[in-house]
Image: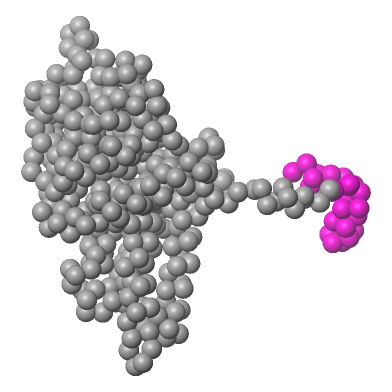
């Protein structure tokens, strides 16, 4: 705006715009950008040594330890204990938890790289890691009292799975229509929680729940409060896992809180601020879901591309036919776009810049691309893609929920539109 005002003040309106800009350029002594400085400006997909190290280590673990049992876990509909212990042993469950609490002390980008790499092999395991790192761990880091942090961060980093208990039968996208109630005791020393949650990921394995309940329904959403609840508390009942289309090894269960007594010290942050914490942490979580969907898309390519290069029809590799080349070139371009959007959102978040719009955009687009790539992969593989001989059909089943959980695609579009509107009003 300052430059524009300078132009208006300096040049009469009768001067053509092109001549005005040329004169302005001559009037300033502008130094050209140093080529070396330009080279030193990193791309969002240029990762630091630590980020690259954790990405490569996770890829090795996923391919060597996880891949051989993916189909068995999917068929059994459960996560094997050795997988959980492996995740903790590798430090993948406490990515951003400081080292003083036993965590890995890494950054948000590193956590998303871990989610992506695991999702290339098994999205069911990736969602467990994503919820732990981008939702519950960070919520306790950001808003937990020093006592809550000292009590739970070491557990979450070393041996305890967490679960994010928000959704209910009548409150999905309208999350704050929840009916779970937290009634304070007369002396305010504890709360009694009554209510039921549905579709709660990680519930079967969880040792701790980040629970959202309303302490005062007359205040509406401003009564929503977050509690850290031990899963073994009296009155906590975890129901049987849902039988799902995909992510079958990831437990998704109803959880009932029947007169559960929770000490007032277990309140996360301030009473009545749970809605703010929930919105803020889900904005971060959407980037994690994008990383999972990115991993699914790349995992599909890992299955399909070797087949296209090896399988021959009419005397040529399938991948050499121009019709096929155009298809996988197009999808590779879209996968790259998701990758750039994902890690751009990560960098924005890490820098403290606004990122809500970018998080919603990449969550929306990543789910669309993953579904498209998974579907096309089955077509490329032909008959074998329709069987369980390869993991293509599993990726196809697993990706669908990407447009549903942590904010449906319509909710993402609504969020994006509101921000765009505010930019132009």
The residue positioned 89% from the left and 47% from the top of the image is 29
**Quadrant for the N terminus in the image:** top right
The residue positioned 38% from the left and 47% from the top of the image is 57
> What sort of colour scheme is used for the picture?
one colour
Is 280 placed left or right of 224 in the picture? right
Q: Quadrant of residue 425?
A: top right
Is 329 placed left or right of 159 in the picture? right
In the rendering, at what x and y percent does residue 68 appear? Answer: 21, 57
User: Considering depth in this image, is 236 or 247 the residue closer to the camera?
Assistant: 247
Main SS, magenta residues: helix
Q: Can see residue 3?
A: yes
Which residues fall within the magenta stretch? 1-30
How many numbered callouts?
0
Q: Can see residue 361?
A: no
In the rendering, at what x and y percent does residue 80 appear? Answer: 16, 46
Is 301 placed left or right of 125 in the picture? right
């Amino acid at each position: 705006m300052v430059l524009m005002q300078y132009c208006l003040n300096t040049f009469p309106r009768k001067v053509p715009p092109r001549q005005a800009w040329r004169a302005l350029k001559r009037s300033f002594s502008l130094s050209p950008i140093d080529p070396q400085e330009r080279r030193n400006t990193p791309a969002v997909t240029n990762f630091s040594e630590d980020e690259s190290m954790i990405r490569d280590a996770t890829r090795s673990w996923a391919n060597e330890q996880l891949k051989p049992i993916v189909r068995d876990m999917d068929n059994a509909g459960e996560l094997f204990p050795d997988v959980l212990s492996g995740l903790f042993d590798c430090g993948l469950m406490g990515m951003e938890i400081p080292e003083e609490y036993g965590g890995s002390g890494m950054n948000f980008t590193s956590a998303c790289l871990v989610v992506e790499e695991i999702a290339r092999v098994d999205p069911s395991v990736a969602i467990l890691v994503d919820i732990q790192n981008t939702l519950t761990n960070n919520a306790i880091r950001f808003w937990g009292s020093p006592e809550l942090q000292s009590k739970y961060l070491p557990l979450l980093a070393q041996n305890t799975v967490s679960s994010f208990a928000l959704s209910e039968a009548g409150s999905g996208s309208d999350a704050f229509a929840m009916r779970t109630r937290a009634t304070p005791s007369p002396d305010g020393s504890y709360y009694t929680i009554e209510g039921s949650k549905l579709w709660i990921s990680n519930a079967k394995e969880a040792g701790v729940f980040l629970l959202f309940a309303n302490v005062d329904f007359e205040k509406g959403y401003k009564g929503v409060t977050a509690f850290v609840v031990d899963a073994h508390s009296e009155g906590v009942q975890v129901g049987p896992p849902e039988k799902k289309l995909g992510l079958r090894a990831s437990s998704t269960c109803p959880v009932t809180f029947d007169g559960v007594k929770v000490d007032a010290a277990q309140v996360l942050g301030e009473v009545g601020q749970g809605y703010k914490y929930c919105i803020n942490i889900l904005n971060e979580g959407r980037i994690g879901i994008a990383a999972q969907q990115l991993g699914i898309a790349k995992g599909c390519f890992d299955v399909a591309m070797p087949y296209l290069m090896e399988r021959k029809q009419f005397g040529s590799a399938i991948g050499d036919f121009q019709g096929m080349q155009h298809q996988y070139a197009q999808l590779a371009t879209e996968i790259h776009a998701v990758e750039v959007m994902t890690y751009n959102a990560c960098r924005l978040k890490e820098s403290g810049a606004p990122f809500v719009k970018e998080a919603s955009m990449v969550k929306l687009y990543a789910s669309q691309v993953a579904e498209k790539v998974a579907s096309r992969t089955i077509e490329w593989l032909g008959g074998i893609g329709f069987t369980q001989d390869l993991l293509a059909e599993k990726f196809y089943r697993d990706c669908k929920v990407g447009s549903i959980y942590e904010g449906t695609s319509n909710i993402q579009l609504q969020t994006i539109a509101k921000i765009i509107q505010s930019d132009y009003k």
